[in-house]
Image (cartoon, helix red, strand yellow):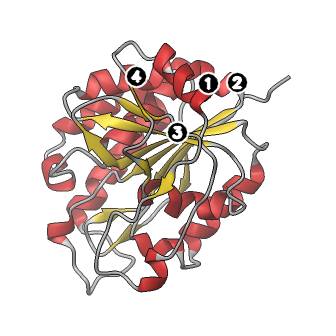
Amino acid sequence: MTATMPAVFVGHGSPMNTLEHNRYTEAWHDFGRSIPTPTAILAISAHWYVNATAVTAMAQPRTIHDFGGFPQALHEVQYPAPGSPALAGRVADLLPTDVYLDESQWGLDHGTWSILVHMFPESDVPVVQLSIDANKSFDEHLALGAALAPLRDEGVLVVASGHVVHNLRAIDWGAPGAGAPWAQAVDEAGRSLMATAPARITELATHEHFLRAAPTPDHFIPLLYVAGLADAADVTADVLVGGYDYGSLSMTSYVVAG
């Protein structure tokens, strides 16, 4: 029998978390050690935000360094996990939308590997990445997440990566480890919804500070996939680790138990 896998949403923070050891990376590490080894990982990263629904379908996805201005050591990081064309095909079969099987263009971006280097440092679990289709509504993304539910019973770990609060223009470099009042208000409203009725997380878009917290939707949308998975299982989500950084980033992560 294959264990039912949890699903997790991670507030990934700075790419430098790849190289650093802090309470967030320790929580990611401990989570990876606390669950059975997945048959594969389906990653949903804020950083593959395109006008299509696509999955990486290559046997060996490349490590994408999709950032600038960071130390050379970060650019030298490789996460050589194998891909899984079989899982890519399974995802395409499950989702009620057209899915492009990407065999050469994308790979694993830092929204995925900056987390997985801590969760699964041996990089020996196959990884497939699912894009975020910018043309779809929040409700449609929630439904796509629910449609992926059978994967959990097939031993696949769904890892969504983004932020509930992500406003880089409002960064306050003098406030490490802190969240502005408006950021905390949005994050706490999100916690309440995920802890009681995950399918209602789309209602966070009506919060008075939501557009300040998510001036672009790319980092918020991955949470909808985990909320959809929770709703499909008729369960709620627990906070894996919480916190803030530089005033305008929420580091809150959620887990849906297996």
Image mark for residue 58: 3
Mark 3 and mark 4: Cα distance apart in space: 22 Å
Q: Which quadrant of the structure image shows residue 38?
A: top right
Read off the residue under disc 1: 151
- Callout 2, which amino acid? Glu
Which residue in the structure is indicated by mark 2?
A: 154
Residue 120 occupies which quadrant of the picture?
bottom right
Q: Nearer the viewer, mark 3 or mark 4?
A: 3
In contact (CB < 8 Å): disc 2 and disc 1? yes
Q: Is residue 171 above or below residue 221?
A: below
Horizontal and vertical percent for residue 245?
Answer: 35, 72
Residue at disc 1, secondary structure: helix
Residue drawn 69% across the image and 23% down it? 153
Earlier sequence position, callout 4 versus callout 2: 4
**What's the CA distance linking mark 4 and mark 2?**
17 Å
Q: Secondary structure at mark 2?
A: helix
